[in-house]
Amino acid sequence: MTGIWTNWGGTVSYTPAEVITPRTVDELADAVRGAVGRGDTVKPVGAGHSFTPIAVAPGIQVNLSGLRGIRAVDLDRRRVTLAAGTHLHEIPAILEPLGLAMQNLGDIDRQTIAGATSTGTHGTGARFGGISTQIRGVQLVDGTGTIRDIGEDDPDLKAAALGLGALGVLTEITLQCVDAFAVRAVEGPGDVDDVVDGFLDRVAEFDHYEFYWFPHTRATLTKSNSRLPADTPSDGPSPLRRYIDDELLANRTLGALTAAGSRVPRLVPVFNQVVGRALSARTYTDRSDKVFVSDRDVRFREMEYALPLAEVPDALREVRSVIEGRHRVSFPIEVRSAAADDLMLSTASGRTSGYIAVHRYHRDAPASVRDYFRDVEAIMTAHGGRPHWGKLHTRDADYFREVYPQFGAFLAVRDRFDPQRVFTNPYLETVLGS
């Protein structure tokens, strides 16, 4: 008997018909071939950090925890091959002894490398692509149970590096790493008008730039990160001090105020003013992953859209207007950027992109969350926005045909890799078609 599976955000729950945890690729391939013969569906699940039902497995759920760790190293080319179930937070310990690092990371590292890349997880920095752009090869089991190795010269890699789980079950991923490096982080408060007006300039100035705006206030928190040699000494607040600031104070304060705002929405502007006034500046230097990644203890719902970078300031002004007129929002809005790439379904495919992410506390009234996301989504789609595949949205295949020039090419790859739709689920039927 299988139990109920629930994702981290609490937006998806279901009971798979069967759960398997293969320990070898051959074992997985046998299971897929058996499913094909029975007419079953198969779906891998990672760490459950997608808010969408992209990982829902009505039939056989594949738990990738049996496929973890390093598989191969090519130091001359700075490449490592990892089993697909390896978690992002496990990778720095693998790379550090090799003198390597991942080129860029998001601010959460609980995901598996397969889940993060399959949904388009990204960090920030207009000269750096999402994690999927670091892939130089994959191994997967396709919809016939065949084990496929797809190298960097194979045009199918542009689909498989960010494949939504629609092409097969990833088993190995080869990453292009870089020499280890440090990051100098400069964080501090700012006025929202100044920060929005100067967004494009700051994105061009810093290696990695992002900011958070606290709705119903003029307060923002900016983060300007610069890459430095790996041997740069660490400085600034100690790890203990940063833990106290980030976890004990920031997470717990945010958690308490968002919970209170959920119970009494009319007080949300007051609570956000309290948070805004508490923001202070700090500067520190540390190993890259220790700067990029932060813990998120407060549960929330999230929607994020990628827009052409130049359109981000105007879209933000529209979002501000909608919030002030109609909504009470306790969570800050996060704004980032990424380089253009050539992956078929990357949110930054063919264009340098800016990202606007909106959140709501997980216990906020469902109707208020729905209305807020609906209003923001209308703004994003008017700018030709592309939603993050793992975050909440209401778009379908017809919309994606309009905003992804290579959408048809991806569907053609899917037809070859999974002709019987062994890896489909209701989410993929919506976003890709049947």
Image (tube, rainbow, N blue to C red):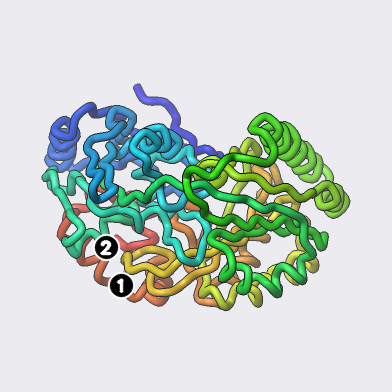
Residue 196 location (% of width, % of height): 70, 70
- SS for dot 1: loop
Q: Residue at x 30, y 72 (%)?
A: 406
Q: Is residue 370 visible?
A: no
Q: Residue at x 47, y 45 (%)?
A: 230
Judge left or right: residue 183 versus residue 16.
Answer: right
Callout 1 crowding tier (Cα within 10 Å): few <14, some 14–19, many ≥20: many
- CB within 8 Å, label 2 to label 1: yes
Q: Is residue 117 above or below residue 350?
A: above
Residue 334, quarter of picture: bottom right
Judge left or right: residue 59 versus residue 277.
Answer: left
Q: Residue at x 65, y 45 (%)?
A: 284
Q: Is residue 224 above or below residue 87?
A: below
Point out the image quarter for the C terminus.
bottom left
Label number found at residue 406: 1
Callout 2 crowding tier (Cα within 10 Å): few <14, some 14–19, many ≥20: many
**Which of label 2 and label 1 is nearer to you?**
2
**What is the three-letter code of the residue carrying label 2?**
Lys
Residue 349 location (% of width, % of height): 38, 69
Judge left or right: residue 268 versus residue 392.
Answer: right
Residue 39, quarter of picture: top left
Q: Is residue 94 visible?
A: yes
Residue 191 location (% of width, % of height): 79, 64
**What is the three-letter code of the residue carrying label 1?**
Gln
- SS for dot 2: helix
Residue 420 location (% of width, % of height): 18, 53
Between 222 and 171, the one lying in front of the other is: 222
Point out the image quarter for the N terminus.
top left
Label 2, label 1: how many angstroms apart (C-alpha)?
10 Å
Residue identified by numbered label 2: 158
